[in-house]
Image: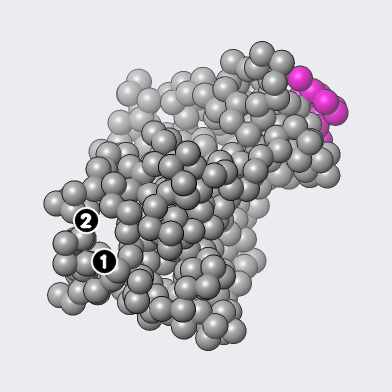
Amino acid sequence: MKRIAVVGASLAGVRAAQELRAQGYDGGIVLIGDEPHLPYDRPPLSKGFLAGTASRESLDLLEAGDLASLALDFRLGVRATALEPGDRRVLLSDGTSVHADGVVIATGGRARTLPGFEGAFVLRTLDDAVALRAALVPGVRVAIVGAGFIGAEVASTCRSLGLDVVVLEALAAPLAPVLGPSLAAVCARLHLDHGTDLRCGVQVVGCSPAGVSLASGAVVPADVVVTGVGMTPSTEWLAGSGLKVGNGVHTDDGLVTSLPQVVAVGDVARYGGRRHEHWTNASEQAPVAVANLLAGHTAQTYTPSGYVWSDQYSGTLQLAGHPRPDDTLSFVDGDPSASSFVATFSRDGVTTGVFALNNAKLFTRLRRQALRRPEFQPSVQG
């Protein structure tokens, strides 16, 4: 391979480029990104950057030395519009194209929007965060639709700015399908303890300058409305490529598509029927995907750690593994009413997950002991 195109200039794409060099690839790497910015980290967008305590420069994923050593050919501010495997080309929105012997798809996704919420803010990109931050002036009332990680983190930041915040959630409790009822109640308590008006089990129908309209006919007054209801994988540009898409780019367990010269990583990758939207997942996939791309076949398979964290109010939540909400929950240290605790999930006597609130040390130890995993696993195809 003389040239590899990495389509997507966020974390997954950057990690893939770094891994290409780390694994000895010395050919050309073209990094294509639809945003005009150099690659940046997304987690601070809902936290320090939104609060005004983190600078734009602190978000950069690559320092000057990294840029020099990676020798990347940046194509920023342009979208990939098509993949033509037969001609080994990626077509771009500015009318140009990139010839590539291999392709890493790392296009991630865009914030999902709700009908009737055309005037609402979302938070996915740097530009989204800049626009929202400008709107968070003293005295505004903020309504957030969705009590997932993004919604909770935005609510936390808004409260730190002294703003009145209401969070509207369709579920009976935040993150209940992921954490189960006991830990969902802990997430709800974090909101309530810090003065956020959390309303669960409500259906929203739209927003207007007056606020958010509910299915009940009530209107929640708000000057700023933010929706945090997930993301949609960016796969439209792959129509006609021959790749299978649908809730992401379909790959095998080695992150290889039906074309061995094309792999997918990050939020857009649907591997073995699964897709995960976690920072750690995007970072961990790169070594496996790149190794298989350079090998020309699936020589390694990817085993996700399932690690995710979220900073909310005074709490740092950490989760590792792949628990189900109906798994048995046991508190190893503390209890759900405490400001710090660690709990484990188990199924049929096997630990399936570890969860902690403000107890990183014990969480890390239990995660390593109970959820050991090989970094790479040889494939039966290898």
- Mark 1 or mark 2, earlier in chain: 1
Residue depicted at x 52% and y 37%: 148
Q: How is the image coloured?
A: one colour
Mark 1 to mark 2 CA distance (whole Å)? 9 Å
Residue that badge 1 annotates: 79
Residue that badge 2 annotates: 237
Residue 197 in the magenta stretch? The answer is no
Residue type at mark 1 is Arg
Q: Is residue 54 left or right of residue 292?
A: right
Residue depicted at x 62% and y 68%: 54
Residue type at mark 2 is Trp
The quarter of the rendered structure image containing the N terminus is bottom left
Residue 107 vs residue 294, the one in the foreground: 294
Residue depicted at x 66% and y 13%: 348
Range shown magenta: 328-341
Q: Quadrant of residue 100?
A: bottom left
Q: Which mark is residue 227?
A: none
Q: Is residue 246 visible?
A: yes
Residue 252 vs residue 315, the one in the foreground: 252
Q: Residues within 10 Å of mark 1 (few under 14, many from 20)?
A: many
